[in-house]
Amino acid sequence: MPSRIAGTGRAQSEEFRRIIEHATGWMIEYMEHPENHPVLSRSKPGDVKSAFPEEPPETGRSYESIFADFEEKILPGVTHWNHPSFFAYFAISGSYPGILGEYLSAALNINGMLWKTSPALTEMEELSLDYLRRMLGLREGFFGMILDTASTSSLLAVAAARETSGEFDIRKRGMAGRAELPRLVLYTSREAHSSIDKAAIALGIGSDNVRKVPVDTEFRMDASALRRMIEEDLETGAKPFCVAATVGTTSTTSIDPVAEIATVCREFGLWLHVDAAYAGIAAILPEKRFVLDGCDEADSLVVNPHKWMATPIDLSAFYCSNKTALREAFSLVPEYLRTEETDVVNLMDYGFQLGRRFRALKLWMVINYYGVEGLREMVREHIRLAGMLAGWIDDSDLFERTAPTPLSTVCFRLNPRKSTPAKDSRFLDELNEELLKRLNETGKVFLSHTRIHDAFSLRCAIGNMRTEESHVRGLWELLNSIGRELAGG
Amino acid sequence: MPSRIAGTGRAQSEEFRRIIEHATGWMIEYMEHPENHPVLSRSKPGDVKSAFPEEPPETGRSYESIFADFEEKILPGVTHWNHPSFFAYFAISGSYPGILGEYLSAALNINGMLWKTSPALTEMEELSLDYLRRMLGLREGFFGMILDTASTSSLLAVAAARETSGEFDIRKRGMAGRAELPRLVLYTSREAHSSIDKAAIALGIGSDNVRKVPVDTEFRMDASALRRMIEEDLETGAKPFCVAATVGTTSTTSIDPVAEIATVCREFGLWLHVDAAYAGIAAILPEKRFVLDGCDEADSLVVNPHKWMATPIDLSAFYCSNKTALREAFSLVPEYLRTEETDVVNLMDYGFQLGRRFRALKLWMVINYYGVEGLREMVREHIRLAGMLAGWIDDSDLFERTAPTPLSTVCFRLNPRKSTPAKDSRFLDELNEELLKRLNETGKVFLSHTRIHDAFSLRCAIGNMRTEESHVRGLWELLNSIGRELAGG
């Protein structure tokens, strides 16, 4: 076989050693000075793709020329989630131990569909999710598995809920053409993430059957309204089957009253799923443990270490207190995947994805390298910085907060002299859209937006491990300088 | 903030440089001598997990002690998919350029949910899947996206099929409690992968409504039988909506007659999905291009570079000729994810998963480092080796093939003097189960099994880039030595 294909060749190994050394040097420079790049890519649509030939190369190229392409053609098209002034969506952090984990995982290249196909994958997944469960202060008895995204976690949760609701045997008989099957209804708050709707769409529940429960003045699901809506639906002959509560909504990071919702779920026999993808991590702080109050009663819960726990994307932690339901919803073992072990967990039985890469390694490394203490300090500092920014906004004549700041995300807008009532002004919307545009064009910060009470609102999400007080001060100065210009104009 | 959390600290960067150098040294030694490890892990259930403390560490640990754990506690629990005598399931290859891609991707840690959140991610995904499409000889006009697994790819395909079948608006109204909705029926062959059933289960189609079309003597879907089954179902008032054909079934790698099936699909207006996860890659060889004959007419197709194209897991390439259907099935844009660009692809719109890591980088690097030529040589060599083994088996007095060998996977069993007819012998099943057990216990090879015509059959799947003729010879010697012992006993 030609040298480059026989991967064991000494020459190729030495080439690899050199390119990794080079890439590591580049990486360290990049990680130490992410601010040398504009945080939001300035690439125009098509720029990256058109920089490359249309046809793949017939013969192999050198690592040097491949790496040059990476730096010159790909990197300008990267929006830098590593930048300490990335404040958009939910800011995240890769980290050195997380990168090491991915590096080793890519080399091992194992597929943990079955316990047997790498016992270490299944057992490290169990161990690291057990560590995380302890850090979050969740009770024992949750079965944990790692998935790619919270979207997938929530989809599995709703599927298990669907399977356990009534004796409909949807798994076998499906849902179409069955006159006896009642309309299945899922409840979530108006502020819930779109992934809940998407799960309902994929599972054939239908977006019309995702009822949006009203929220209180702090954007938390109204548990009394939930009860009323369930009663109404029952009267029409529909079958309520699941409630998806949110700990840390995407717009404002509001925290649903899970304990109250759990009471309603118990009363009506509904599956309780909790989407704590972002805010659940805050529970590693003793002083913020309350964000998961009531979650011990949940049937399932998702929290994302790839969001606020220094773990490279992707790593979503999915917990289910009803392992059997998950298995009943999904297990299907063809002959070619049958193994002799009977006392082990084969992770393919608990979802629809067969292939499974070794994600647990990076999470285990992150927890071990920083220690629980180190991760707590990061999360605590982010919350402190958000509080500081919120205070400046409250004291300002130019800006106002548009939602409470329970954790590390601040919602606010420009409203000179705080004179214009929230709902009345298309003018303020335009002013803030312009503010956001100018901010992001500086290349120094990147924020995203939302609408709150139908008003355009900026969001500053603090969650990158490199973000320090100076970066938040820098943002505040930029906001004031552009804000004054816009207000005075 | 404490030193370890501020990721930009010089000291931490130097620690990282040292551990990466150490890990690279370990990795090269590992890649050059995978045979130093037993291919199938000898770990017993619980061994790996119980080697670690129950509680996560409060304070951070050194990389040295973390790496020592990796080598001493985790590695013994690894089944080595890198081993050149890993012949189970479908053998795969990580590769140096693929590892480099994952390494850099973990460092960038970008989330390409929207074009804007890293234009390079979306555009490199487009570019690398366009390269792959050209390599496979598929027509232009397929929209490509990268997913984690073929299971997810097939689920999206069937969801899009469901949405486009009739005017049922399942996305909005769901499937339950709708008396007017006909039973929806999906067709696939008896030999299709379990992921098709799992997609139907998840999507609420139901496993009963996955009709298994009979196969011919070479395990290929019988297109006439398919037509008859569709006609039967139509007569009962059911709604056939999708056919999932397979190019390279898991048991025997049989190749469905896609062109014939496409004709039936056109006739009845059914969505044609092709699962070419393993065998599709063979089409990069001009002499094997025929495996994808008819696939230009498919509505969707999945092929997995993480199987037979030297790309670390996970990377499944999903192609859809009806981009609009996919978008209509899944697009849902909440305010906080709305962007100003209108002329770009936001990949979150084409599936249910929001988060998206930068997988295209490794695929692009693999294609560039080996060149199309290099990858062709690898695939061609694997097919040659499988043919060699098949020939030895055919000439042997001890063994017989149990299925044709169209590509790189050989199905066979021990049948001394080829005297026992396939279906009659529980004795032969036990003999072959014992053979497989003893083979895998040697630690020198790892094979898996299937049932063919209800008889236990071994599978030798050649697909690792380090597999050379000597490894196949080594397997053949082992087979003969254990086989003779069992036959003579």
Image (spheres, coloured by chain):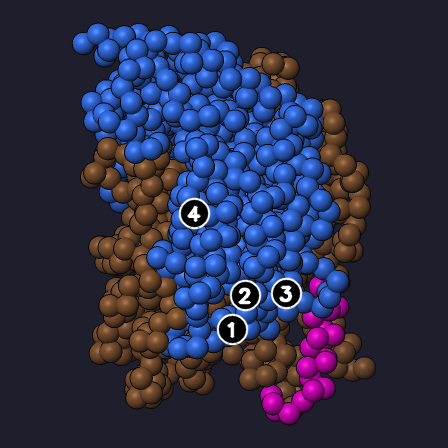
Chain colours: A brown, B blue
Question: Residue A375 placed where, x, y %?
Answer: 41, 51
Between A172 and A133, the one lying in front of the other is A172
Looking at the rendered structure, the kind of residue marked 2 is Ser
The chain to which mark 3 is attached is A
Between the C-alphas of marks 1 and 2, the distance is 7 Å
Residues marked 4 and 3, same chain: no
Q: Which residue is mark 2?
A: B165
Between the C-alphas of marks 2 and 3, the distance is 41 Å
In this rendering, the label closer to the viewer, 4 or 3? 4
Q: Secondary structure at mark 3?
A: loop
Are circles 3 and 1 on residues that touch, CB within 8 Å?
no
The chain to which mark 1 is attached is B
Are circles 2 and 3 on residues that touch, CB within 8 Å?
no
The residue lying at 68 percent from left, 82 percent from top is A429
**If you read the primary sequence from the N terminus, does the residue marked by circle 1 or circle 4 appear first?**
1
Are circles 1 and 2 on residues that touch, CB within 8 Å?
yes
Q: Secondary structure at mark 1?
A: loop
Quadrant of the snapshot with the C terminus of chain B: top left
Q: Which residue is mark 4?
A: B213
Count of residue discs: 4
Between B266 and B11, the one lying in front of the other is B266
Residues marked 3 and 1, same chain: no
A169 relative position to A250: left or right: left
Between the C-alphas of marks 4 and 3, the distance is 53 Å
Characterize the local packing of mark 3: few (<14), some (14-19) or many (20 or more) Cα atoms within 10 angstroms. many
Are circles 1 and 4 on residues that touch, CB within 8 Å?
no
Magenta segment, which residues?
A421-441
Q: Which mark is residue A447?
A: 3
Q: Secondary structure at mark 4?
A: strand
